[in-house]
Image (spheres, rainbow, N blue to C red):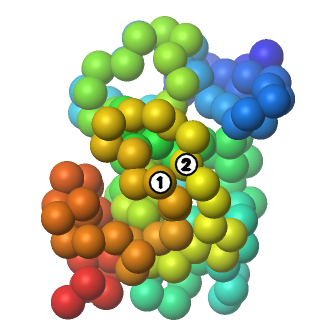
Amino acid sequence: MIDSTSQAYSLMVMPDDDVKGKRIVAAKNVQAGEVIAPIVGYQEVDAPSKYTVQISAHRHIDELGLLTYLNHSCDPNVIVDTTSFAVIAIRDIAMGEELGFFYPSTEWRMATPFACLCGTAACVGVVDGAEALSDETLSRYFLNEHIQELRR
């Protein structure tokens, strides 16, 4: 286990496993609405990659430190808010629970689409960005402002 860079945000990176690779878990109980971590120290880049987060129609950020290991979930417990530049709990999270956000909430088109392995009833099957999903599916999730604008 790798401790977070800040005691105030109590995140842990769990080692690689055969399915998901490294992942972030909560190092303490977290309440809905709580800021889990600020998004700081990033670098803006022009082109998306497997590790970037889209923050506007044509801008992406990279070099996210521990947040690089924040995995996708079709049943997310956190959001990545690109307006406040923070990772925020959307429900109560127990200590040790993996943190996951819905990648299409930030990504219009994925640089590296992949088959989702979450197995939840809400699973989208292939994670390929918001552009590839129906309005009905997207209506179930928090979507950042730039994704909402690109949908119009």
Q: Which mark is residue 152?
A: none
The amino acid beneath tag 2 is Cys
Q: Residue at x 63, y 60 (%)?
A: 114
Residue 5 visible in the picture: no
Q: Helix or strand or loop: what does disc 2 sit on?
A: loop
The amino acid beneath tag 1 is Gly
Q: As drawn, is 149 to the left or to the right of 88?
A: left
- Among the 4 quarters of the image, the one containing residue 18: top right
Place of residue 127 in the rendered image (x, y in percent of width and height, measured from the top left): 51, 61
Place of residue 39 in the rendered image (x, y in percent of width and height, measured from the top left): 54, 52
- Among the 4 quarters of the image, the one containing residue 33: top left
Q: Which residue is mark 1?
A: 125
- Classify mark 2: residues with Cα within 10 Å, few (<14), some (14-19) or many (20+): some
Residue nearest the observer in this picture, 90 or 64: 90
Q: Considering only vertical position in the picture, is 20 above or below 52? A: above
Q: Which residue is mark 2?
A: 116
Q: Residue at x 52, y 69 (%)?
A: 128
Place of residue 63 in the rendered image (x, y in percent of width and height, measured from the top left): 74, 60
